[in-house]
Amino acid sequence: MDGIIARLEGLVARIAGGADDGEGTPVSVSEYDNVYKNSVQPFVDACNKFEETKKLAAWTETSFKHSRNIIDAATQCKKPDADMMKFLGPIVQVITDAQIQDNRSPFYNQHKSFGEAIQCLNWLLADGPKAVVTAQLDGADFYLNKVLKEAKDKDDPAKTDMRAFVSTLKKMLSDLAQYCNDFHKTGIMWKFSGGDVKDYKAGEKASGDESKSAGPEARLEAACAALEGYVAKQGGGEDGPVCIGAYKEFYTASVEPFVAACDKIADLKAMGAEAKKAFEHVEVIVKATTECKKPSQGDFMKLLGPIVEVITKAGDLDRKSPVANQQQTFLEAVQALNFLCMEGAPKAYILGQIEAGSFYSNKVLVAAKDKDDPEKSDLRAWVKTLKELLTGLAEYAHEYFKMGLVWNAKDGIDVKDFK
């Protein structure tokens, strides 16, 4: 029984972004490290270009590094109550200090934009963190535009460095918002039977972990409550399950532009129709997961029928065709839909299909150089929209099916009865 409960607790942790990355670090922490390296550090470097903004660099380092401690602590500690604000202390202090600006300073707009932006770290307490981060980016935008306006009259390197301050600050918040959406969509989830946050030390496991000492009923109740909350939030409201609405948005934003790009090239119109057929049927599969219990392998393959047909037809290549490279690229791309049959890690697989087809898509781009417009632009648009389609699919699959398709085990119907 203890082993089964431990597996259930591990599943809950994976849903909350607490799974191991293969090197002993929870995924939510290792991915945050990537955000810091690729997005926070460049802003720190930009601040250090000016003596007047070096203080902002130090504040950023302090607050964002302590944010990592909060995220790490959540993977091993139970949710703190009265101790939470004390634990957030270094971040609260930075946010407070950043609200004091000297309006006579020539760097007032930089300090003011930072004062707005740094409040994004309130996401650590929010149920919908992405919205908190993007709101503060909007709040900083007015002052960032003033920085850009001032930069126009400067000489290099000041002009370039001021522009870098703006671009890196925007990227830092944009990437943080995406991270929040990927790993903490409904807020930070703490470990239900974890240790006390007062015992947490960065880089060490918190003592007092109660996961083994707590009774099996208490552990099961905590795990089930967490999963029920997760399912409720994913279930959507009057517009239906969130995964369906999100897929419709993906289709409009990513699939339709590719189909339109195919329609502009006479030899690729049939390919556009095939793409439309396959990706429209993906929505059917997504809808089926919300209404049906998990089908047998045979029934699932029947349900996948239209997608299998498109992949099979794409493999019938005409190597003498003037669009042979497009055909080969599309064959690699459409195989990304095999993620529907996978258990976990769909994002890496889907993005891998971009790489698999890059040899042929690069040939399309090379050939486009010798063409005149509109043919040149149409060929480039075809490559661009196909890459964006797969990138969008990877993000969608990662957000809603990061462990594979999840079926309606509680009250789902037989997939044979699904319409």
Image (tube, rainbow, N blue to C red):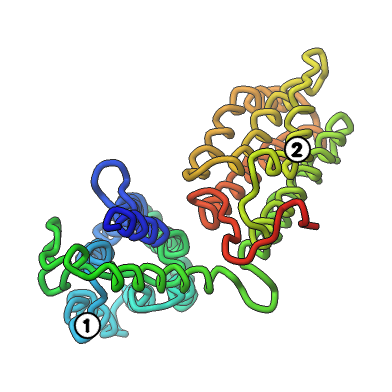
Comparing labels 2 and 1, the label whose residue is closer to the camera: 1
Q: Is residue 82 above or below residue 259?
A: below
Residue bearing the label numbered 2: 377
Q: Is residue 55 visible?
A: no
Give coordinates of residue 17: x percent, y percent: 38, 58
Q: Is residue 247 above or below residue 277?
A: below
Left or right: 48, with 231 as reference point: left
Disc 2/disc 1 C-alpha distance (Å) = 55 Å
- Tag 2 secondary structure: helix
- Tag 1 secondary structure: helix
Residue kind at label 2, given as amino acid type? Ser
Give coordinates of residue 255: x percent, y percent: 72, 49
Mark 1 Cα-neighbour bin, 10 Å: few <14, some 14–19, many ≥20: few
Q: Is residue 8 visible?
A: yes
Q: Nearer the viewer, residue 184 or 233?
A: 233
Give coordinates of residue 112: x percent, y percent: 35, 78
Q: Nearer the viewer, residue 373 or 323?
A: 323
| Numbered badge on residue 85 | 1
